[in-house]
Amino acid sequence: MRRLRRIVGRGLDVPKPCRLRDGVKGLRVSERGGLLLGGPGVRSTAHLSSQSTSRWVGRATSTVARSPVPRPRLRHDQVLVGVVDRAVGEADACVSPRRRDPFVPDPGVEFSKGAVDRGARLILGSWQACPRPDAAVPVDGADVQELVDAMTAVTWWRGLHAGPLSKVAANLRYHVAKEGGRIDGRIDISQRLKRRPTMIDKLEREPQMNLTQMADIGGVRARLPSLAHVQSVSRRLQKTWTVVRTRDYVADPKASGYRAIHHVVRRDGRLIEVQLRTVRQDAWANQVEDDGRDRGVGFKFGFGAPEVHAYYVVMAEAFEALDRGLPLSGVLVARLEQAFTAARPLLPRTAFRP
């Protein structure tokens, strides 16, 4: 219980869920000080840290109201904090969102892969057992300590990918520059470590996967000016890097319409995913994600009305034609207009217009 006492004793270090002062339900304050949308149907947490509370309150409330999926979703960190609160009788008060993550392990602490995988399953199980956003799983102190250790193990495993991720991103910049892949004079590369809730959420969607097998905890994305640049950078990486797996969604698009080339590479013993997209492919993928966040529906993961997905598929076909320098046929334009008309009542105002 030593680590549990230290976490609880710090008090302000625990990212406790708290209600906003205006009483809007379904919103939480994240550890970055942004808003978390935790209402029904949100497959992945909507983190709105760059926006002010007042700007998003109305939008987030309407998103919760419109969402069709019945079971509430909670941020896993908040589920655990609720468990800790219930077990130790902590005061129900909001805490500072800018303190150190309480689940970062002490220097020198290591875990086996088996411990990491068991910890991830334990966190997923505790989350699934939580029936509503304001509930906590009633467990005894020993179980709480197990959950704390599980969060620490998952955080440790996630942190092991930070160094390799930075190396891959830096090296990718070099290869993109060599292939002339600048957009408006700059190399457009982004990187991210998958957040803990997103990692656990993926384990729920893919129950056969272990966390230590997840290949996209560290991810790098390059936005390139054309399909030719995507192909040339891809060939270059396959010649010079240790590529474990390649998925060419340009040659074989996903059923959703998603297109890109994905490489899983090994760097310093860790798997890092590299995504190569054209400007249009990246705009399409971001729009699907933004629409899902706006509507509170996981469009990205196949949820939502079929009319919306039919529209995304046709729009992806149109973007593919433009990426290949082909004119849009009259048949494709007619399909696009028809699909948009059917999906329009279900789309946010910011959706693509044909």
Image (cartoon, grey):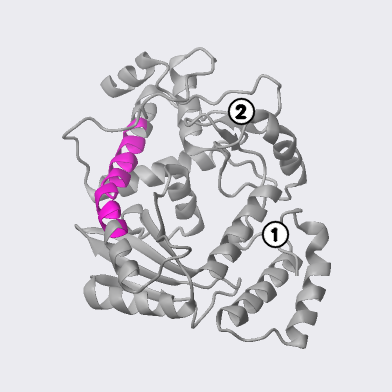
Picture coordinates of residue 243, whole percent (x, y): 27, 72
What residue sits 58% from the left and 28% below the top?
A: 135
Magenta span: 148-169
Read off the residue under disc 2.
Answer: 134
Where is residue 324? Give x, y as percent.
Answer: 55, 83
Local SS, label 2 = loop
Q: Quadrant of the C terminus?
A: bottom right
Magenta stretch prevailing secondary structure? helix
Q: CA distance from mark 2 to mark 1?
A: 26 Å
Of residues 305 and 277, the one drawn nearer to the viewer in this rendering = 277
Judged by depth in the image, the label closer to the viewer, 2 or 1, is: 1
Is 95 placed above or below 83 here? above
Circles 2 and 1, Cβ within 8 Å, touching? The answer is no
- Tell me where residue 185 appears, x and y as whole percent: 43, 62
What is the crowding at mark 2: few (fewer than 14 residues within 10 Å), some, or many (at least 20)?
A: few
- Indicate the amino acid at tag 1: Gly
Question: Residue 254 has which mark?
Answer: none
Nearer to me, 56 or 104: 56
**Residue designated by label 1:** 304
Q: Judge whether 198 appears above or below 224 on screen.
A: above
Does the image show residue 69?
Answer: no
